[in-house]
Every structure is written in structure tokens, then in C-alpha cells.
Amino acid sequence: MSSALEKPQIIAHIQKSLNYTVFDSRWIPCSAKFVCMGNFARGSGVLQIYEIQHGELQLVREIEKAKPIKCGTFGATSLQQRHLATGDFDGSLNVWNLEVPESPVYSVKAHKEIINSIDGVGGLGIGDGAPEIVTGSRDGTVKVWDSRQKDTPVVNMEPMEGETKRDCWTVAFGHAFNEQDRCVCAGYDNGDIKLFDLRNMSLRWETNIKNGVCSVEFDRKDINMNKLVATSLEGKFHVFDMRTQHPTKGFASVSEKAHKSTIWQVRHLPQNRDIFMTAGGAGNLHLWKYEYPAQRTKKGADDVDMGVAGSVNLLQNVTLSTQPISSLDWSPDKQGLCVCSSFDQSVRVLIVTKLNTV
């Protein structure tokens, strides 16, 4: 019995039903507040800000917008400003000051179709270099934006002439450990994963995991690339060791089947990059820990260094909902606190215990 109690527990602390479909939820840095994004049944978009007060959720603010909002990030803003960047169903990228959210502080028609995924870097004291936002869209393009530059993206990564446009489902920044280096990883509906090197403006690596890629995330954005987790449609995820790239074999990886349903999202614990949570299509959450191998590199047959994959251990899992959990965000400030939203039109605040002992 004691061993069961020593494991981390995932406790549903607060649950709130919403009157709209929620697609994304994000903690507002340095606060006990988070923001939910989604759409009302009447077709308009909504931003809601909630604050935790005495163990309950208080609605601080609700803002209705013309278009449904699919995704958001605080990653490209300072801790003082805490501006939220959002991508909507119309392909627009907007940056909001949540204190005065009536009109955006930056707005651009970023894509021809829905923005599925967004990430930011260079803000919040995370990642060196310029504050940038990356967007991935159904139109097949991945674009990088600097909110100080109007109307045109800093980088536009699109299929070549004659290439099929694949639906880009997920984007993530990484490798932003100095002023010059920065990478973007993108995952597509056909299983493609592409790693773009923004310093050299080149495609650094690509692979295919044979199933639509729902979520990609580096374990840390602001370090020399270490690990990347990619999740897919049929309950499988892959952990790539990004430290050693072999010229032909690429990066070493380990894959794990969590369950039969889609893994909608992966999120690494901000306070420990080897612990991550996956959010599943059957309303479940799985907490994992990556164990490094004894040696991370070995010599291949060609006498060139290649990476060695570690292993993943399941620490805990819980079923919270009958519907998919579509978004998950750890609190950057309080270890073990997280918020998740699901398609049962609910948002839940969770507490994960004993994370410092695993």
C-alpha cells in the first residue's frame, strides 16, 4: 500500500462547466489566473479569464470576439506585459493586452485557413533573442512572426511548388539558448515531423511517425536541444534524443503506446524537464518520466556518433472526463499545479503531488 501512496497523485482540485467549446487554456504567468479560449455555439469566439480564490474559480472577465479562437500563448511577451497571442479559425494572429482586451495590440491575417497551433519564445525570460511567435495552419504553412514587425512574417516555411499541402497540426520552438540559434518543430496530419533551423534558414531534419502528429514539444525551449516529444492519433508518442544527430539515421528515439485513443497534447513540467504529461482522447491524463540511458551516444558502424534513446516510465494516470482532453498547461510558478480543458465543455484545475520525489 505504501508504494501506491509514494507515487505522484493527480487530484482534480476544481472543476467548472462552461457554456462554450473550449480549445485551449493557459496560465497567466506570475498569477493565480488562467485564460480559456474557444467558441460559442453561435459561432463567435470567446476569451475567459479565471482566478483561483479560496479553492473556487471566479470569472474575472469574459470577452467575445468575432471568430472562434483555437490556440494561444504567452511565450513571446515580457513578464511585465503578459500579452496573450491567439490564433483563430479565420487565420488571424492577434496579440491581446488582457487588461484592455477590446482591440488587439497587434493583428495580422497570418494564414488563409485556421491556425491550429501557436507557440512563443524570447519572452517571459525564456529563450534568448527576439520575441517571436510561430503559427501552424491548415493551409500547410508554418510562419514565424515578430510583433514589432507589421504584416510580414520573419520566416515563411511552405511546401515547394507542386508539393502537396499538408495540414500542420502542431508547432513548437526550441534550441533558443543564445542570440542566434533557434529551431521550430512542426507536426503534420500525415505523420511528418520537420525541424527547421531558423539560424541557417534550412530544414535540418525530417521524419515520419506514420500517424497524424497532434502535439510536439521540446523539454525546454531555452537550452541546447535536449529532447522532443511527439504525440499521435492512435495513442502512441515518441521521445527523440535531440543532442546527437546522425547524418543518415537522424535522432535516436523511443516510442510508447499510452492507450488506444488520440494523444491530443504533451506538456513538460517546467520545474523538471524529464517529467511530462500526455492528454488523451478518452478523457485521461498520463504522467511520464524519461530515464536517460547509461550513455547517450555510441559509435555507429560508420564510426560516427549516434544517439542512444532512453526509456519512459508511467508514474500515474487518471480518467477525468468522457470526452477528449484537448489542452493542458502547467503553472510556471507553482510546481504540480495545472489546468486542462476538455470537450465536455469543462475546465479543471489539477494538483499533482510528490513531483519532487520521483
Image (spheres, grey):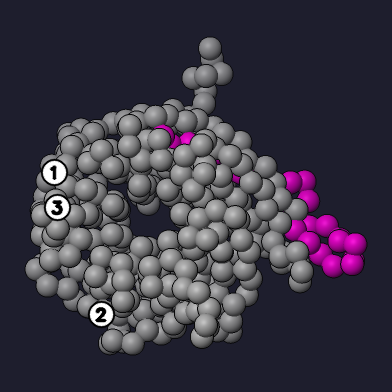
- Per the image, the residue denoted by label 3 is 40
Task: Decide whether residue 308 is among the magenta residues.
Answer: no
Left or right of 196? Residue 52 is left
Q: Residue at position x 22%, y 78% from top?
A: 107
Q: Secondary structure at mark 3?
A: loop
- The x, y position of residue 251, in whole percent, is 69, 61
Q: Secondary structure at mark 2?
A: strand
Q: Residue 19: which disc?
A: 1
Q: Secondary structure at mark 1?
A: loop
The relative height of residue 4 versus residue 185 in the rendered view (above or below) is: above
- The x, y position of residue 217, in whole percent, is 49, 57
Residue 165 visible, this orientation: yes
* Mark 3 nearby-residue class (10 Å; few <14, some 14–19, many ≥20): some
**In terms of sequence position, does the residue under pointer 3 or pointer 1 come before the other?**
1
- Between the C-alphas of marks 3 and 2, the distance is 23 Å
- Per the image, the residue denoted by label 2 is 108
The boundaries of the magenta stretch are: 284-307
Q: Residue at position x 54%, y 37% from top?
A: 258
Q: Quadrant of residue 358?
A: top right
| Extreme-top residue of the structure | 1
